Image (cartoon, grey):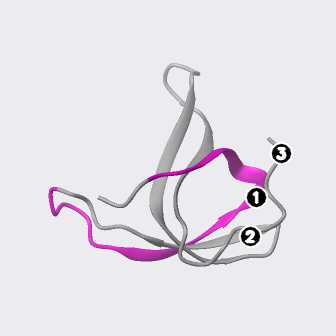
């Protein structure tokens, strides 16, 4: 996937990360991260991940590697 050279801090994104094939069925597995950009240097994205809407997961700061990203798109504020 071609990634942007610059992503402004504060932008709200959804980032899909490839986790690899499932051990049981062999199908590819993914995880989505939704949050606000803290920093992007072209290889690493630091994201303040939003808490789950149902309260099951608190917000957290995550670091995502560019080589694991399969999709990236802006999303509106909730």
Residue visible at 49% across and 24% down in the picture = 24
Viewer-side residue, 1 vs 78: 78
Label 1 and label 2: CA atoms lie apart by 6 Å
Q: Which mark is residue 11?
A: none
Viewer-side residue, 39 vs 18: 39
Q: Which of marks 3 and 1 is nearer the N terminus?
A: 3
Residue 16's place in the image compared with 76, above or below, is above
Q: Residue 44 carries which label?
A: 2
Q: Does the magenta stretch include residue 62?
A: yes
Residue behind mark 1: 66
Left/right of residue 42 with respect to residue 65 in the rendered view: right
Across and down, in percent, residue 10 comes to 53, 76
Residues at badges 1 and 2 in contact (C-beta under 8 Å)?
yes
Left/right of residue 70 with respect to residue 4 in the rendered view: left
Q: Earlier in the sequence, mark 1 or mark 2?
A: 2
Residue 10's place in the image compared with 22, above or below, is below
Across and down, in percent, residue 41 comes to 80, 75
Mark 2 or mark 3, whichever is nearer to me: 3
> Within 10 Å of the Cα at label 2, are there few (<14), some (14-19), or many (20+) other Cα atoms?
some
Left/right of residue 44 with respect to residue 52 in the rendered view: right
Magenta-drawn segment: 54-75
Mark 3 or mark 1, whichever is nearer to me: 3
Q: Is residue 63 magenta?
A: yes
Residue visible at 29% across and 58% down in the picture = 78
Label 2 and label 3: CA atoms lie apart by 14 Å
Residue behind mark 3: 2
Residue visible at 41% across and 55% down in the picture = 76
Q: Quarter holding the N terminus?
A: top right
Residue visible at 60% across and 44% down in the picture = 19
Residues at badges 2 and 3 in contact (C-beta under 8 Å)?
no
């Amino acid at each position: 996937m071609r990634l942007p050279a610059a992503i402004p801090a504060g932008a709200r994104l959804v980032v899909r990360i490839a986790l690899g094939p499932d051990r049981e069925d062999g199908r590819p597995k993914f995880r989505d991260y939704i949050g606000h950009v803290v920093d992007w240097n072209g290889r690493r994205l630091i994201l303040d991940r939003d808490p789950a809407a149902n309260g099951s997961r608190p917000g957290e700061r995550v670091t995502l590697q560019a080589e694991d990203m399969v999709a990236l798109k802006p999303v509106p504020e909730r």
